[in-house]
Amino acid sequence: MPSSYDVIIVGLGGMGSAAAYHLAARGHRVLGLERFGQAHDLGSSHGGSRIYRQAYFEDSAYVPLLLRAHELWQKLATDSGREVFTETGGLMIGREDSLAVAGTLDSARKWGLDHEILDAADIRRRFPTFTPAAEDIAVHERRAGVARPEATVSAHLDLARGRGAELRFGERVLGWEDDGPGRKAWVVTDRGVHTAEQLIFAPGAWAPSLLSDLGVTVTVERQVMYWFQPEGGTGPFTADRHPVYIWEDPDGTQIYGFPSLDGPEGGAKVAFFRKGLPSDPDTLDRRIHPEEIEAMTEYLRPRVPALPGRFLKGAACMYASTPDEHFVLSRHPEHTRTTVACGFSGHGFKFVPVIGEILADLATEGSTDHPIALFDPRRVRV
Ligand SMILES: Cc1cc2nc3c(=O)[nH]c(=O)nc-3n(C[C@H](O)[C@H](O)[C@H](O)COP(=O)(O)OP(=O)(O)OC[C@H]3O[C@@H](n4cnc5c(N)ncnc54)[C@H](O)[C@@H]3O)c2cc1C
C-alpha cells in the first residue's frame, strides 16, 4: 500500500467515482475517500434513474460534453457489463417559447442533433399517456434516455478498484491543506492523515463546508422523487414505448419523468425540477409528507392522467446549486494542488463519465481540451 498517492479524491459519488476510474485507468496511484458506503442513498446520486439528453436547453455550450459523455457511457457499459444507461428517446413538452422547447431546439439546430417537432395532436397520438394543451408542442430527441445512478457509481468504482485504486468507505474528511509548490497536499480524516501530489474535491451537497474559500455560493435544496403505479398497469409506460420527458408549464414550472424501469410492480418515477426547500445535508428531512404526494398527484392528473394511480414510494435527494445553475469544474482558484467539481445544480448526472475524464486531465495535466470555460468559479464570485 503506497504511503503517499498521486491523487486523493474526496467524495466517491457520481463525479468522484468517475474521476477514480479515469485516473486509475491512466496508471495513477489513487486514494478515494467516502464518508458513507458504495453507491449510497444519502447524497445526490440515488433513486434508480437520471435523464440523459443531448439537445441541452440550459445552454448549447454543454453539447460537446454530452457528445463525449455518450461515447463514454457506451464504453462504461461495455467495460463493466452493467446496464448503466438505456436509450428511450426524450420528449420536451411546453409552449413554443418555453425554455424546455425553445432551448432544446436551439441546441439541436446549432449542433445538428437528430430531433422532431410534434404538435399537441402528434403528442397525443404517439405518446397517449400525455394530454397536452392545444398550444403545447414538443421536441422529440431520439438520443435521450435513462442513466442509472447506483449502477454507474458502482461500475466506476469496481473498475477503478480493478485498476489498483484504493477506495475507503466510512471515512470522513475533516480538513485539508494544500501547501503549494514543492510540498505535498494532505487531508485529515476521522481515521488519520493522507498525503498526495494532488487533491480532487467532489463532495456534492457538502461542498459549502469543505470548500469555504472557493468564492461561490452553493445552495443545497431538498428534492423529492415520487414513484406511482399507473392506473391500468405499467403497460403503456414501459421503456420500449415510453420516453423520458420534461414538461414545462407557462408559469415556468417543470416536471420530469421516466418510463417504468423496474418491472410491472416498480411503477414510474416523476418529480418537480427545482422547487426544492433549502436544506442542510446533515439534517435533511427524508420523510415524504402526505401533502407533497397530494400536490404531485393533483399536478399530474390533467397532464399524465393514468400515472398517479397508486403512490408507491418517495425518496429525498439533494441539488447543490450555484447562483446561475452552471457547474463548478476547475482548478481551485486559491490552491495550486487542488481541483474542484461541485455545484452540479440538479443536472449533472448525465455528464458523469466526461466529468471524470476532465477531472483526471485537470489533476494530472493542469488543463483539459474539453470546453469548460462556463464552469470557472470566478464567473460567479458571490
Ligand atoms: C432528485 C434528483 C434528480 C436528479 N435528476 C437528474 C437528471 O435527471 N439528470 C441529470 O443529469 N442529473 C440529475 N440530478 C443531478 C445529479 O444527480 C447530480 O448533479 C449528481 O449526482 C451530483 O454528483 P456529485 O458527485 O456531485 O454528488 P454525490 O453523488 O452526492 O457525491 C458526493 C459524495 O461526497 C461524499 N462526501 C461529502 N463530504 C465528504 C467528506 N467530508 N468526506 C468524505 N466524503 C464526503 C458524499 O458522501 C457523497 O458520496 C438529479 C439530482 C437529484 C437529487
Image (cartoon, helix red, strand yellow):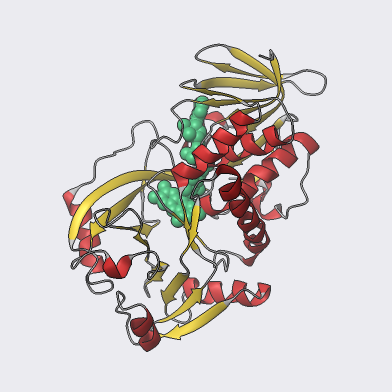
The image quadrant where one finds the C terminus is: top right
> Residue 77, image x and y in percent?
56, 49
The residue positioned 61% from the left and 30% from the top of the image is 162
Looking at the picture, does residue 293 appear above or below residue 202?
Answer: below
Looking at the picture, does residue 70 appear above or below residue 141?
Answer: above
> Image quarter for residue 302?
bottom left
Looking at the picture, does residue 181 appear above or below residue 240?
Answer: above
The image quadrant where one finds the N terminus is: top right
> Image quarter for residue 127?
bottom left
> Residue 121, image x and y in percent?
36, 88
Looking at the picture, does residue 36 appear above or below residue 306?
Answer: above
> Residue 227, image x and y in percent?
27, 54
The residue positioned 78% from the left and 17% from the top of the image is 183
Is 100 displayed left or right of 308 in the figure?
Answer: right
Label total for image: 0
Q: Nearer the viewer, residue 90 or 273?
A: 90
Q: Nearer the viewer, residue 220 or 204?
A: 204
> Image quarter for residue 57?
bottom right
The residue positioned 27% from the left and 71% from the top of the image is 304
